[in-house]
């Protein structure tokens, strides 16, 4: 996905794409997930922006409102660079399987010209493309080689289900509300991802994950150890960082996400020191979680300078 530098274009464009997805009056779960994946890739959307977008995803967008959103977008297009942003976003949408057919390329060109001129009916025109393209994106994601690592499977089967199963075998019960369990499983997955970034798991990293789960997520030592071990097992097989981030973002507050970046640095520094590779991966995660740059730096500075190579 190209880096969009102009937030004044990105937000109106995202709203227009949502309106187009609602053009037929329906937006099912598969389409919604694909739409969220597409929009979550827009890097300059803040947490507040995402909250705005969720309002439009919640209920159908009528034709009158869709045309207003289109006009807002058109009024934002001031330069050739602005128009290129629209082109790049449409290309990302149409390029669900890595290629665009000649027919799709022609349709995309018509939509681009219509957007620039605020042509009547452009939302309907875009909408006729968006529905099928979103479904194609979701089908491709579902059939990818790492399909067994998709976020719901990770939470429900690999961590949550396995944890319940192991505790039941020992005559114990896990009395944690499902929503909280989901949140801490996502957190554990991201921490394990950082621990495995160098394709090596140090016992200190697994212990650090358990400590974070115990101190920040109110698990007892037994629960924290189990979640850490199961998450690290999953990380060694490969986890979908993007889906983990989107899931974690959607059920956490800005403060929780800012504090969580400190946990990631704690895990990264638990095996001797924090490498540049780990710092950059945490930076990517912080961006996906819409954590402000100054908060990322603040979290990085919790690691002694000598332990991060003076980075």
Image (tube, helix red, strand yellow):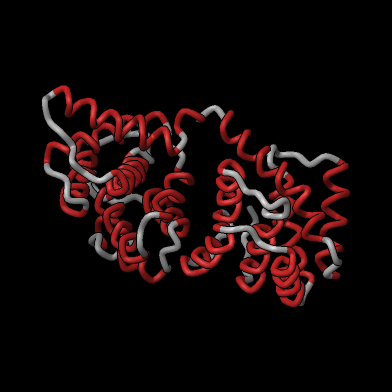
Residue extending furthest toward the top: 169
Residue 267 lies, in percent from the top left, at 26, 48
Image height of 50 relative to 143, above or below: below
Count of marks placed on residues: 0
Residue 194 visible here: no
Residue shown at 28%/28% (left/top)? 162
Q: Nearer the viewer, residue 81 or 66?
A: 66
Asked where in the image residue 125 lies, by quadrant, the reply is: bottom right
Image height of 247 relative to 70, above or below: above
Residue 169 visible here: yes
Residue 55 lies, in percent from the top left, at 54, 63
Image height of 232 relative to 297, above or below: above
Residue shown at 17%/26% (left/top)? 168
Residue 88 lies, in percent from the top left, at 72, 56
Residue 246 lies, in percent from the top left, at 46, 50
Relative placement, left or right, of 82 versus 55 is right
Asked where in the image residue 10 lies, by quadrant, the reply is: bottom right
Q: Nearer the viewer, residue 311 or 103?
A: 103
Relative placement, left or right, of 66 versus 114 is left
Residue shown at 69%/69% (left/top)? 65
Image height of 238 relative to 194, above or below: above
Asked where in the image residue 83 lies, by quadrant, the reply is: bottom right
Relative placement, left or right, of 52 versus 129 is left
Q: Nearer the viewer, residue 249 or 55?
A: 55
Q: Nearer the viewer, residue 97 or 204?
A: 97
Rendered-image quadrant of the C terminus: bottom left
Residue shown at 47%/44% (left/top)? 243
């Amino acid at each position: 996905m190209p880096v969009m530098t102009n937030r004044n274009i990105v937000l109106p464009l995202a709203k227009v794409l949502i309106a187009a997805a609602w053009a037929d009056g329906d937006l099912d779960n598969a389409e919604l997930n694909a739409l969220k994946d597409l929009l979550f890739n827009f890097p300059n959307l803040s947490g507040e922006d995402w909250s705005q977008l969720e309002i439009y995803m919640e209920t159908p967008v009528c034709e009158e409102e869709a045309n207003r959103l289109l006009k807002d977008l058109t009024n934002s297009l001031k330069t050739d660079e602005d128009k290129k942003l629209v082109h790049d976003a449409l290309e990302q949408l149409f390029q669900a399987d890595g290629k665009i057919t000649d027919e799709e390329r022609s349709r995309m060109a018509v939509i681009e010209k219509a957007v620039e001129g605020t042509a009547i009916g452009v939302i309907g025109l875009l909408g006729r493309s968006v529905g099928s393209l979103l479904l194609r994106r979701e089908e491709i994601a579902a059939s990818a080689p790492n399909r067994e690592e998709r976020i719901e499977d990770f939470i429900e089967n690999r961590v949550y289900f396995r944890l319940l199963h192991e505790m039941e075998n020992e005559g114990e019960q896990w009395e944690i509300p499902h929503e909280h369990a989901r949140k801490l499983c996502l957190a554990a997955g991201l921490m394990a991802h950082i621990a495995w970034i160098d394709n090596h798991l140090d016992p200190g990293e697994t212990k650090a994950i358990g400590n974070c789960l115990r101190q920040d997520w109110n698990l007892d030592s037994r629960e924290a150890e189990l979640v850490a071990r199961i998450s690290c097992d999953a990380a060694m097989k490969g986890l979908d960082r993007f889906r983990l981030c989107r899931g974690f973002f959607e059920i956490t507050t800005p403060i929780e996400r800012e504090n969580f970046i400190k946990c990631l640095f704690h895990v990264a520094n638990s095996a001797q020191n924090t490498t540049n590779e780990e710092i950059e991966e945490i930076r990517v995660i912080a961006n996906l979680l819409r954590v402000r740059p100054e908060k990322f730096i603040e979290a990085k500075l919790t690691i002694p300078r000598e332990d991060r190579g003076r980075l």
